[in-house]
Each structure stands twice: as structure tokens, then as C-alpha cells.
Image (spheres, rainbow, N blue to C red):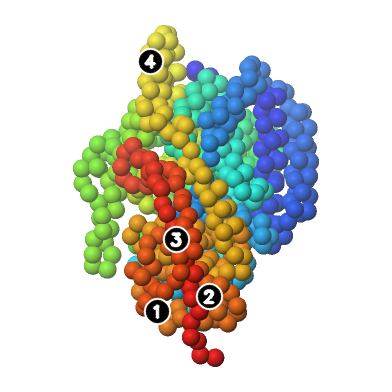
């Protein structure tokens, strides 16, 4: 494999795939723009679809001018990967109840379908006073003790909608791309968006491996990825991770393709893919070091037309990203970081930050000069130094760091954050062997300076994400949700390197047996974790229960949900009732309820001639302020399964059956 990754042409399958990618990217950006402008409607979406298809066809015709690369069996491999992914991932989790982040995206999609935009009026707050509204939302200054949020006013309880209580408006609380795709479909159909992109990711990994190494590496890595528990879980649950994964890996693939084929159209497509990935996940901003290296590489080649096209495209997509970015989400993320792990930067001031930036820029310029002046020696020195550093970092993070518990100090107290397990815990899901094979792949590339520019681009891309997400948790330290940061970029990159190491070893030894044994062992380790979940569909029956619940509630009623206290989960359905069916469903807060405020709200609804209902899981007398005299109207039963979020390994399957009780609140004696 000494000549790996050096293809001069674009194959017929690659041209077709790039045309599909162009259409998907164009429609994604157009749909995000329409949602941002409040124009997300059937007519505008259809026009966007026609334009996206036209752009895909144009890209296919443009790329057809290139000499095709002779790559056999590509059509069959791509077809089999798509079928395998569809069969494996096509059991989508019915995450409609708002128990965590995954359900935010389908709920936002339902909001988009109703309102045509990401901001809308929240009718359940109409007529309520400030004190009465506080029964149902959490002001931003009460959300976290160590962070003072200024990016938004507050959050609806159990809804994850950003709310401005004074104006009565709500804003979606997550980046929009996954939701605009889900908004194309109704009900359960929207859940198939993530399996669709999950299957497409397998093809991207295959093509990426083919460009970097050879087709065997790409195929092996994509199969490993498909059967891994993290990819399986996030390709079924309606998170944004797999949607973003498709676009960010496609961006890397397209930039590498440009380095090998010099088609300037790819610069524009690469920038558009990066914009789409940012519209799906804010984490994709960590691809900027790789983008910087890409620009540096084409500058060193004196490819001025390509550099101009790349910079112009990136600037245009930057403007689009700034316009469509979810401001409450990006602002709150920055505030959390600056109040936590990056709080030292906040205390430095502008002058030290500028000075550090100038020093780093000087060092980078010096490194580029030395590399250009002594290319062979510099490449060898940097490659071996980086290999040793990565080897030591992985060994420390897997075996030494877990021995010392880590804490975070805030307001004079220390909180356990489990940062010592940030690499060791994910290693249990994909196996330590993958980590060490990935290190071996890096060593193979760098120790004898075998890496080409595209390999450096790939490594910088991977290390930019891995260095951050194996340093600190940037999400809750419970699993499997904590794997979400590693799924889009880190795990696919590691599997490509591991597959390369296995096949390089087999070729080096001139015997297939060692490579076959290693590859088979990786399959066994991955299946050991993921196989028990292959035929598990999370939340089965939830949509049916949810629709039956909506049918049993009068359309003009106000439904108050029991607070999320103890083992109560009925409040998970409050926000979905408003998102999907526009019902006035309100989840009461967890703190002591203000009896006067609640009575005032009840009197308002009573004066409007509206029936007030209470949906509870236990006797409301235990939490209702004052005596509860409601009349029991109905009982509803919800039974299903979910993969529990905990630090337990392997993740436990939570099988449950709940009974919810529907009460009618009697008329009150209200003063006029």
C-alpha cells in the first residue's frame, strides 16, 4: 500500500454520489434559509427541491469532463452498503416524549410545519401575568448557579423551547438542519431521516477510505462503523449527530478530492457542506483547523484560482451561517464555556489574547517556512514527534488518567465531573483494540513520512475533534448520550485508521491471516456490545399512545401536567401536545407552586369558558397547592422501552408501563 490514496480521476460512482450530495446540500441550505425567514411552506420547499435537483444535475455534467478513475465493483459496494444501513438502522426510535435532547428535533419539526418558521407565538401564555407564567417556565438566571445567561430569557419547563415571557414568543433551541429535514414528513415518517443519513454516511466513509488509502480500507471501516453501538444508536434516535456527520465527512471527502483532482467546483461544494454541517451541529466549528490547512496547501501549490474560489466560497457560507445560526443556542454555548472550562480566557483581557495569537501565528509561519525549506527532514521530525505524543496521550487517557477522579470547582464547592473517564468510557463501546489500531495507523503514515497532503488534512481534521472531546465532557457524563460528540467525526476517523493499519500489516507480512484475525476480532468486539440492541426499537408504540392522548383531550381545553418530580414522567408529553397538535398543554414547575398565581390562571381560563384538566401520574393532592378537588375522568396506559441514560455499561434497556390519570378541575369561586 505504498501508493495508497493517489487517484487522478473521478469515477462514475463518485460523480453520481457528488451529484446526490450537491442536491442534498443545496436543499438543506435553502430549507434552513426558508425556516430562518419564516417561509418554510410546501410551495417554497418544492421550489427549493427543484433548484437543488437542477444543481445536482449540473454538477454531474460538470464533473463528467474529468477522466474517470478505474475503480471496479464500486456500484455493487455502494448499493450493498445502502441496503445494509437501511436494514440495520431502519428501526427508528419513537422519541416524541421530551425526556431528552433527541426529542427536541421532531418537536421542532412539528413547530416548523405549523408556523413556517423557527419563532412563533406561544398562545398558552395569552392573558397570564408574569407570576402566572413563572408557573410554567424557568427564567434564564435560575437555570444554572455558575452561569448567568444573557442569550435568552428562559426555557419552558420540559419543552426546551426558548421563551420570552413578556412578548409570549418561543424560539427553537437547537440548530435547524435536522428539524428542517424532519419537517418534510408527518408523524412517525419524520423519524426515518436519521436512518436515511446513517446509511448514506456508510457510503461517505467508504469513498473517503478509498481516496485516502484504498477501497478495502474504506469498505472495512464502513462495515465496522455500521455495526458499532454508537453508530447504531444515533442512526436510530432522532438526534442531529448523524445528519451533521454526513455533511462534515462529505466536506472532508470533497476537500481531499480537490487536492487529488483540482476541480474548482469542489471548493464551492466543500464550503457549502461545511455550512450545512454547522447548521446541523455547532461542534463542526472544530473543522476550522483542517480548513486552514487546506487553504495553506493550495497556497503552497500556487493554485491561485483554487485559493480564490475557496476563500470566496467560505466567506459566502460564513455569512449564511451567521445569518441562520441559532443565536440563543450558540450564545448559551459560549457563555457556558466562558464560565467553565474557558473562564481563564475571559479573565485575560484583550491584549494578552492578541499577543498569544501573534505568537502562535509567528510560530506557524516559521513552521511553514522550515517545512518548505527542509521538507523531508521537517516531515520526518513532525511525524515522529506527533506519533509519540499521540501514543503517550492514548496510553495515559486509557490507563492512568482513570485512576484519579476529577472535580470542577464552583462557588467554593467541588463537583465530580468524571473527566478521567472521557476516553476510557467510550473505549468500552468500540473496544480498546480500535484505539490502538488507530494509533498504529497514524504511526504507519507518519513514522517513515509516508503521508501525503490529503493524509495530513485528514489527521488534522480528526485530531481537532479528538483533542477536544477526549479532553473534557462537553455534554452530560451519562451514556449513551455522552457518545454523541464522538460519533460524527472521531469514531469514523479512528476506524479508517484502524482498517488501514490492519490491511497494511497483512500486506507487510505478505500473509492474510494476521489481518483477517485482527479484523475479525474487531468485528467480535463491536458485535459483543451492539448485537443485543439490533432488534430493539426504542419507544415502540409511543406515537400511537400520543395520538390517542390528543384525541381524548377536548381541543379547547387547558391541560396542566404534573411536575417532573420523583418518578413522574407524564410531563414529557406536555410540550409535544403543543408542538404537534397546538393544544394548550402546560407543564407545572418543580418548585413550590404559588397557590395565588395558579388560582388566578384557573380563574382566567374559567372566565374564557375553557375546561381545565390535570394529567397526573400520582394523586395530585401530593403536589397541588391547597386541597385538590378534581374529578377523575379517565385512565391512560403507556408501555414501551427506552435505552436508559446512565453510567452503566452496557446501557440497560428500561421496560416500563405507566398509568396516567386525567382529572377535571371544578369551577372556582372567582372575584370579578
Residue 127 position, x and y percent, is 57, 80
Marks 4 and 2, the one that precedes in the sequence: 2
Which label sits in the foreground, 3 or 2? Answer: 3
Considering the numbered disc 3 on the image, is that residue within a helix, a strand or a loop? strand
* Residues tagged 1 and 4 counted as in contact (Cβ below 8 A): no
The circle on residue 594 is 1
Marks 1 and 4, the one that precedes in the sequence: 4
Which label sits in the foreground, 4 or 2? Answer: 2
Residue 406 position, x and y percent, is 25, 51
The residue lying at 50 percent from left, 79 percent from top is 667
Residue annotated with mark 2 = 165
Q: Nearer the viewer, residue 304 or 101?
A: 101
* Residues tagged 3 and 2 counted as in contact (Cβ below 8 A): no
User: Please, is residue 356 above or below residue 451 in the view?
Assistant: below
Neighbour class for label 2 at 10 Å: few (<14), some, many (≥20)? many
The residue lying at 46 percent from left, 50 percent from top is 638
Marks 1 and 2, the one that precedes in the sequence: 2
The residue lying at 46 percent from left, 23 percent from top is 500
Which label sits in the foreground, 1 or 2? Answer: 1
The residue lying at 66 percent from left, 38 percent from top is 21
Q: Quadrant of residue 342?
A: bottom left
Residue annotated with mark 3 = 661
Q: Nearer the viewer, residue 583 or 533?
A: 583
Which label sits in the foreground, 3 or 1? Answer: 3
Considering the numbered disc 1 on the image, is that residue within a helix, a strand or a loop? loop
Residue found at the very far left of the displayed protein: 403
Q: CA distance from mark 1 to mark 4?
A: 66 Å
In the shown orientation, is residue 105 left or right of residue 346?
Answer: right
Amino acid at each position: 500500500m505504498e501508493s495508497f490514496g493517489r487517484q487522478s480521476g473521478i469515477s462514475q460512482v463518485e460523480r453520481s454520489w457528488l451529484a446526490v450530495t450537491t442536491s442534498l446540500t443545496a436543499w438543506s441550505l435553502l430549507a434552513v434559509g426558508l425556516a430562518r425567514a419564516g417561509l418554510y411552506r410546501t410551495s417554497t420547499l418544492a421550489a427549493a427541491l427543484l433548484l437543488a435537483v437542477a444543481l445536482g444535475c449540473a454538477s454531474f455534467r460538470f464533473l463528467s469532463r474529468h477522466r474517470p478513475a478505474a475503480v471496479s465493483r464500486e456500484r455493487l459496494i455502494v448499493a450493498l452498503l445502502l441496503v445494509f444501513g437501511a436494514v440495520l438502522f431502519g428501526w427508528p426510535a419513537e422519541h416524541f416524549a421530551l425526556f431528552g435532547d433527541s426529542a427536541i428535533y421532531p418537536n421542532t419539526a412539528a413547530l416548523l410545519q405549523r408556523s413556517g418558521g423557527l419563532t412563533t407565538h406561544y398562545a398558552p401564555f395569552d392573558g397570564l401575568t408574569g407570576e402566572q407564567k413563572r408557573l410554567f417556565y424557568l427564567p434564564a438566571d435560575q437555570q444554572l448557579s455558575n452561569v448567568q445567561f444573557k442569550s435568552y430569557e428562559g426555557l419552558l419547563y420540559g419543552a426546551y423551547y426558548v421563551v420570552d415571557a413578556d412578548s409570549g414568543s418561543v424560539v427553537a433551541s437547537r440548530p435547524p438542519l435536522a428539524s428542517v429535514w424532519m419537517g418534510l414528513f408527518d408523524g412517525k415518517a419524520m423519524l426515518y431521516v436519521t436512518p436515511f443519513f446513517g446509511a448514506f454516511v456508510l457510503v461517505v466513509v467508504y469513498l473517503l477510505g478509498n481516496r485516502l488509502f484504498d477501497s478495502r480500507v474504506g469498505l472495512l471501516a464502513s462495515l465496522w462503523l455500521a455495526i458499532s453501538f454508537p453508530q447504531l444508536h444515533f442512526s436510530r434516535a432522532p438526534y442531529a449527530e448523524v445528519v451533521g456527520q454526513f455533511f462534515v465527512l462529505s466536506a472532508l471527502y470533497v476537500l481531499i478530492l480537490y487536492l487529488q483532482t483540482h476541480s474548482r467546483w469542489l471548493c464551492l461544494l466543500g464550503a457549502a457542506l461545511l455550512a450545512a454541517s454547522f447548521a446541523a451541529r455547532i461542534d463542526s466549528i472544530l473543522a476550522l483547523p483542517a480548513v486552514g490547512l487546506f487553504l495553506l496547501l493550495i497556497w503552497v501549490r500556487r493554485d491561485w484560482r483554487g485559493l480564490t474560489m475557496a476563500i470566496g466560497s467560505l466567506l459566502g457560507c460564513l455569512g449564511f451561517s451567521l445569518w441562520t445560526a441559532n443565536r440563543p443556542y450558540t450564545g448559551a454555548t459560549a457563555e457556558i464555556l466562558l464560565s467553565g472550562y474557558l473562564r481563564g480566557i475571559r479573565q485575560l483581557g484583550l491584549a494578552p489574547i492578541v499577543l498569544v495569537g501573534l505568537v502562535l501565528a509567528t510560530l506557524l509561519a516559521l513552521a511553514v517556512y522550515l517545512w518548505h525549506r527542509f521538507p523531508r527532514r521537517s516531515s520526518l521530525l513532525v511525524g515522529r514527534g506527533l506519533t509519540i505524543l499521540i501514543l503517550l496521550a492514548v496510553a495515559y487517557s486509557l490507563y492512568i488518567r482513570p485512576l484519579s477522579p476529577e472535580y470542577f470547582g464552583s462557588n467554593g464547592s467541588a463537583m465530580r465531573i468524571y473527566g478521567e473517564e472521557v476516553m476510557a468510557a467510550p473505549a468500552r463501546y468500540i473496544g480498546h483494540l480500535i484505539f490502538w489500531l488507530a494509533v498504529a495507523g497514524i504511526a504507519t503514515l507518519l513514522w517513515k513520512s509516508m503521508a501525503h497532503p490529503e493524509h495530513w488534512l485528514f489527521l488534522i481534521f480528526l485530531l481537532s475533534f479528538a483533542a477536544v472531546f477526549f479532553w473534557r465532557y462537553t455534554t452530560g457524563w451519562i451514556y449513551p448520550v455522552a457518545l454523541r460528540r464522538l460519533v460524527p467525526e472521531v469514531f469514523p476517523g479512528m476506524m479508517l485508521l484502524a482498517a488501514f493499519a490492519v490491511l497494511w500489516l497483512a500486506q507487510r507480512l505478505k500473509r492474510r491471516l494476521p489481518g483477517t484475525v485482527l479484523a475479525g476480532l474487531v468485528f467480535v468486539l463491536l458485535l459483543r456490545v451492539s448485537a443485543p440492541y439490533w432488534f430493539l426499537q426504542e419507544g415502540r408504540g409511543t406515537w400511537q399512545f400520543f395520538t390517542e392522548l390528543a384525541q381524548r383531550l377536548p381541543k379547547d381545553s387547558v391541560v396542566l401536567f404534573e411536575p417532573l418530580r420523583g418518578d413522574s414522567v407524564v410531563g414529557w408529553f406536555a410540550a409535544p401536545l403543543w408542538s404537534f397538535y397546538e393544544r394548550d398543554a402546560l407543564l407545572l414547575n418543580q418548585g413550590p407552586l404559588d397557590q395565588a398565581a395558579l388560582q388566578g390562571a384557573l380563574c382566567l381560563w374559567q372566565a374564557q369558558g375553557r375546561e381545565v384538566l390535570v394529567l397526573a401520574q400520582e394523586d395530585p393532592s401530593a403536589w397541588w397547592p391547597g386541597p385538590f378537588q378534581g374529578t377523575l375522568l379517565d385512565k391512560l396506559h403507556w408501555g414501551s422501552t427506552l435505552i436508559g441514560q446512565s453510567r452503566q455499561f452496557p446501557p440497560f434497556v428500561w421496560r416500563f408501563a405507566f398509568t396516567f390519570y386525567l382529572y377535571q378541575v371544578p369551577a372556582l369561586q372567582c372575584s370579578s
